[in-house]
Image (cartoon, rainbow, N blue to C red):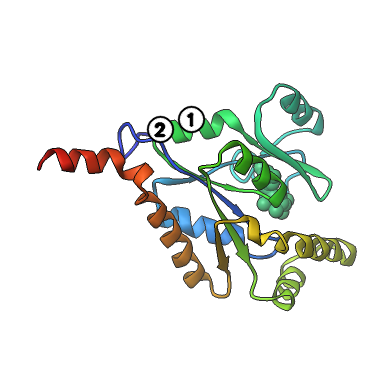
Amino acid sequence: MSSERPGAHGQLFIVSAPSGAGKTTLIERLVEQMPQLRMSRSYTSRTARSGETDGVDYNFVSRARFEEMIAAGDFLEWADVFGNLYGTCASDIEALLADGSDVVLVIDVQGARQVRHLRPGATTVFVMPPSYEVLEQRLRGRSKDSEAAIAKRLQVARDEVASFTEYDFIVVNDELTAAVDRLRSIVQADRCRLSCMRADAERIVRTF
Ligand code: 5GP
């Protein structure tokens, strides 16, 4: 895909949220509205849920293949989430960024810590549900998961929300359209940073 900003290197965004906070829908809406923003496709060792497609929702691979990729150093970050392995392929991300696309990684707090360390220029966003009760309702409402699985997700969510201070921005997903607007503002503001705008600004300065 060709860049809309020739020669520009894209910006990396990280979005984390507890399971059930609605981040997938949020990010899908965001990338629909911002064509230059691309969502990274993670690798996972978990099996596809009904309705999920390999190469679209995730790259679904066996645990053995995932472990080979870890050993080969293929991942920018990876983590064990709910007993399954998830990871971001470093070369996929580099290719998108080099093309000038901005890239959003939707990853858990463990993965976010690894990327923050390796790429301190990344912009990080934590999406929160408006309350524990709302998260619980969403998890019970949407899923056919067992009571034990829901309880585990809620427990993990408790630990994850406590990590919010590690992030640059917080978006409360109280209402979908408003939350997408806030995320879009974050991306737009980020694109106005001196580090992104220096070449354009220098070109303007040369016209004076
Ligand atoms: P799910 O199985 O519900 O699609 O995702 C479970 C969790 O894994 C979510 O919190 C999601 O953000 C996280 N996740 C998805 N892809 C990655 C990834 O590439 N790396 C990390 N660290 N977490 C991921």
Residue 112 horizontal side relative to residue 147, left or right: left
Task: Residue 159: name its quadrant.
Answer: bottom right
For the point 58% across and 70% down, the residue is 172
> Which residue reaches farthest top?
72
Secondary structure state at the residue bearing disc 2: loop
Task: Residue 63: name its quadrant.
Answer: top right
Residue 19 seen: no
Secondary structure state at the residue bearing disc 1: helix
Tell whether label 1 touches label 2 (CB within 8 Å): yes
For the point 51% across and 68% down, the residue is 179
The kind of residue on which mark 1 rests is Ala
The kind of residue on which mark 2 rests is Asp
Determine which residue is flagged by label 1: 95
Q: Quadrant of the N terminus?
A: top left
Residue 110 horizontal side relative to residue 89, left or right: right
Horizontal and vertical percent position of residue 190: 41, 52
Determine which residue is flagged by label 2: 99
For the point 43% across and 54% down, the residue is 187
For the point 45% across and 59% down, the residue is 186
> Which residue reaches farthest right?
148
Mark 1 sits near ligand 1, with its Cβ under 8 Å away: no
Q: Nearer the viewer, residue 114 or 45?
A: 114
> Which residue reaches farthest left?
208
Q: Report the Cα–Cα distance between label 2 and label 1.
A: 6 Å
Residue 3 horizontal side relative to residue 139, left or right: left
Q: Nearer the viewer, residue 78 or 67?
A: 78
- Which label is found at residue 61? none
**Residue 186 drawn above or below residue 97:** below
Q: Quadrant of the C terminus?
A: top left
